[in-house]
Image (cartoon, rainbow, N blue to C red):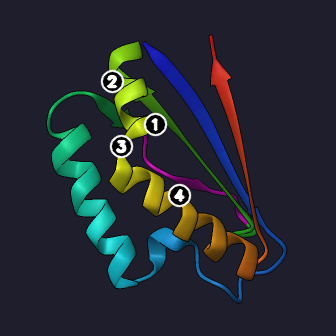
C-alpha cells in the first residue's frame, strides 16, 4: 500500500480550489481517474477536509500497491493532467505539498 497525504494551501479564497471548478479538462480527468483507478480498486481517496478559514484543504490518496502507483505515475493522461494542474496552481497562488507515508 502506498499512502500520500496531500495538503493544498492558498493565500485567499478568490480563486476556487481546482476540484470546485467546472473546467472541462479537469472534469474529463476526474472521470478518467474514477473509471481507471478508483472503480478498479487501484486508488482510494479520503474526502477533502477544508480548514475553517477555507485556506487549506487536506486529503489522502492510497494506492493498493506499488504496481498501481507506478501505473498512475507513468500514465500519459495523468502526466498531462499534472501539467495543467500545476499551471492552475501557479496562476492561482495554490501551493501543494505531498507527503508519502511509509
Hey, which residue is sitting farthest bottom in the picture?
A: 14
For label 3, count other residues whose C-alpha is less than 10 Å away and answer few (under 14), some (14-19) or many (20+). Answer: few
Q: Which residue is mark 2?
A: 68
Q: Is residue 46 magenta?
A: yes
Badge nearest the viewer, 4 or 3: 3
In the image, 63 versus 14, the foreground residue is 63
Q: Tell whether 82 sits left or right of 5.
A: left
Q: Identify the main secondary structure in magenta.
A: loop
Q: Separation of disc 2 and disc 4 at Cα? A: 17 Å
Tell me which corner region of the image, top left, top right, bottom left or bottom right, holds residue 66.
Answer: top left
Helix or strand or loop: what does disc 2 sit on? helix
Q: Position of residue 16 (x, y in %)?
A: 59, 81
Q: Is residue 27 magenta?
A: no
Residue 75 is marked as: 3
Q: Position of residue 3 (x, y in %)?
A: 52, 23
Q: Tell whether 70 sits left or right of 55.
A: left
Q: Position of residue 32 (x, y in %)?
A: 23, 56
Q: Separation of disc 3 and disc 1 at Cα? A: 6 Å
Q: Separation of disc 2 and disc 1 at Cα? A: 9 Å
Amino acid at each position: 500500500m502506498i499512502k500520500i497525504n496531500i495538503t493544498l494551501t492558498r493565500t485567499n479564497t478568490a480563486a476556487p480550489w481546482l476540484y470546485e471548478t467546472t473546467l472541462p479538462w479537469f472534469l474529463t480527468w476526474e472521470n478518467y481517474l474514477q473509471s481507471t483507478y478508483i472503480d478498479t480498486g487501484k486508488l482510494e481517496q479520503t474526502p477533502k477536509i477544508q480548514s475553517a478559514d477555507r485556506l487549506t484543504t487536506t486529503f489522502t490518496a492510497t494506492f493498493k500497491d506499488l504496481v498501481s502507483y507506478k501505473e498512475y505515475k507513468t500514465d500519459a493522461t495523468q502526466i498531462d493532467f499534472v501539467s495543467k494542474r500545476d499551471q492552475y496552481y501557479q496562476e492561482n497562488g495554490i501551493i501543494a505539498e505531498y507527503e508519502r507515508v511509509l
